[in-house]
Structures are given as structure tokens and as C-alpha cells.
Amino acid sequence: MGLFLSEVINASRPKPHKEGQTMVLDRISGNPSSFAESISQYIDVAKIGWGIPFLLDTEFLDRWVRAWDELGVSVSNGGTLLEYCVTKQKQERCIRSLHAHGFRTFEISEGIIEIPGNEKKEMAELARSLGMRLHIEVGKKDLRNQLTLNATLEKIGAALDLDPDIVIVEGRESGKGVAIYDESGKIKWDWVDAIISEFGIKKIMFEAPQEVQQTELIIRLGKEVNLGNVALGSVAALESQRQSIRGDTFGVHPRQPDINGGPSPRFVFFIISTHGAIDQERIMNLTGLNRRTTQNSLASLIRQGLIRETRDMTDLRKKLYSLNS
């Protein structure tokens, strides 16, 4: 870190990160050591996407993976590579080959095909026996064949039964029309709320390829949210969001108090903590939440003793909400 910045703020975030993990999507578009060295402390996993490793010369692949390893970044396969191997009934050979080439994270996905539960368990156990981290991705890649919310929750629950390090919620490279994103890339907050309320945040990673998605997820869920499919060129911008040294998250507390009730109360708490005394209409305008969700979030925060409700002395018909100091 430069002398000036080190005198102002210590922004280092040494690994291993127990929370706030970042997974980059590696398209083999530039030597990792040429750029990523300066920001490698903020990258936990580099996923070599799709079936790209099939296309690479063995010596090149070994050098590439080793370059990431020397930066302290674990390399993962993309789920599509594994799914292709499953269709050829060569999944065991695939896992052992990935490990031999230096991959230290193994991803299981069902983005294209369905894999029987016993086969997923066998693959998970083999990867664990080799000392690899285990990621399981939930979601479908085909925009016309998306899982319902209930099916997504069931898949996440089944994945967690295999005790992975992380369960990844599909987002693809586009961040549009899959899982928690609508066709325009906007986040479906009812889905996020349901996932976090059911499973918590520690073992869930949301693929969030667009920077606006990363920002919104950090604001609503906190800086400890795990994010994947991040472009290498977006890592520094993402970390500046996590550390509140960018306008969107400037002033966000390093860690919110423990708040029950999913992302909506957390987001409302964030708005109140950064805007001071504020009325319900203004909260709705800033968050985009509907009236019922806003009212329920406010009631929950009041019950938890985190905020207080007072009358607006300039208009007694209105109520103001502020932190309960």
C-alpha cells in the first residue's frame, strides 16, 4: 500500500477470509501475475470458466494455475467442465486430474444436467479426500428452464447437506434472467430474503457479475456477503465498496448489529443509520421496498430495540424513525 494511504487508513484485509469472500471469473484473458498481484489479497477463488481447461495446453494450464497459487488464490473449475465429464462417466478422473494440475477448489453444478444425489456425494467425498475446497452451485443456465424459488431453496438445502465450504447461487456471466435476477438484471429481493432467512449468509455466495448488483447486495446484506463471477477489473472497485471508501457505501458501518428478519430490515436499518431521522415514505423511496415490507421491517427493528419511533414535530401526522442510541 502506498505511503499516503497507509498513513490514513489500513485497508488491508489479510486472508483467509471467513466472510466477504470474492470469486473472480477467469476467462484466461491476461496473465494473473501481471495485474492481480496488487489485489490478490482481496481474491479468494479464481474460477476458470466453462470448459476452458479442455482447450489449454497442459504446460500452459499448469503455469496459469501456479501463478494464481503463488498469489494465494485458490483455482476452481467451472461447473460446466464437471457436468461434461459426468456425461462421459469420467467424473472421478476429472476430479483427480484437476487436483493434479493444482486446482484447490472443486465445483459441482447442475446448470445443464441433473446429477443423482449419490453421485454428487461420491464426488464431494473424493474432492474432500484430496484436500480440495468444495463449492456447490445451484441454479440453471437456460433462461427458459429456471428453477422456482421453492425448488431453489430445496436445492440449496440439499447442497448444504453435503457440507460444502460454499453454496453458489447461479448468476451466469450476464447476471440477467437467472435465479435472483430478473431479465433486466435487477435483483429479486424476495428471493434473496427467502434464501438468507432460511440458510443465513455465511455459506451462501451470490454470483454478481454487474457492479451495481455487487453494490446493492453489500448495502442490503452487509460487507460480509460472499460474491462470485466478479470480473478481475472489478475487484478493486468491489473491495472499495466493502471497506466504505466509495460513495455508494461511504459511512456504512463495518458491521451492522445482529438483525433478525432477513435483508429487508437490514437495508432499512442501513438507511436510517446513514440518513438520520426519516419518515416511512422517504424510506420507501430510497429502498424501493413496498409499504407492507417497509412497515414490517420498521416494526421488527423497533421490537429488537434497534430504532425508535417519534412524532415529526413539524407535521404531527407523520412518524420519524431514528437509531435507538
Image (tube, rainbow, N blue to C red):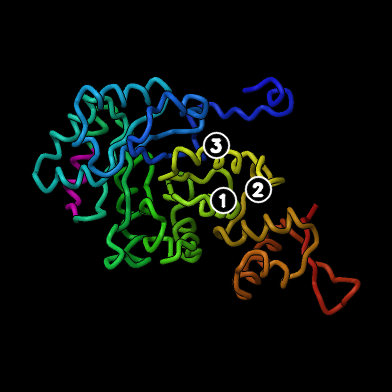
Task: Tell me where residue 66 sits by quadrant.
Answer: top left
| Mark drawn on residue 249 | 2
Q: Is residue 206 above or below residue 55?
A: below
Marks 2 and 3, Cα distance to the nearest angstrom? 14 Å
Q: Which residues are magenta?
A: 114-124
Mark 3 closeness class: few <14, some 14–19, many ≥20 residues within 10 Å = some
Mark 2 closeness class: few <14, some 14–19, many ≥20 residues within 10 Å = many
SS of the residue at dot 3?
A: helix
- Going by the numbered disc 3, the residue's amino acid type is Ala
Q: Which residue is mark 1?
A: 215
Q: Which residue is mark 3?
A: 236
Image coordinates for residue 270, horizontal then vertical, percent: 67, 55
Mark 1 closeness class: few <14, some 14–19, many ≥20 residues within 10 Å = many
- Going by the numbered disc 2, the residue's amino acid type is Thr
- Image marks 2 and 1: residues in contact by CB distance under 8 Å: yes
Which residue is depicted at the point 38% across and 61% down?
Answer: 179
Q: Is 291 inside the magenta-drawn segment?
A: no
Q: Nearer the viewer, mark 2 or mark 3?
A: 3
Marks 2 and 1, Cα distance to the nearest angstrom? 8 Å
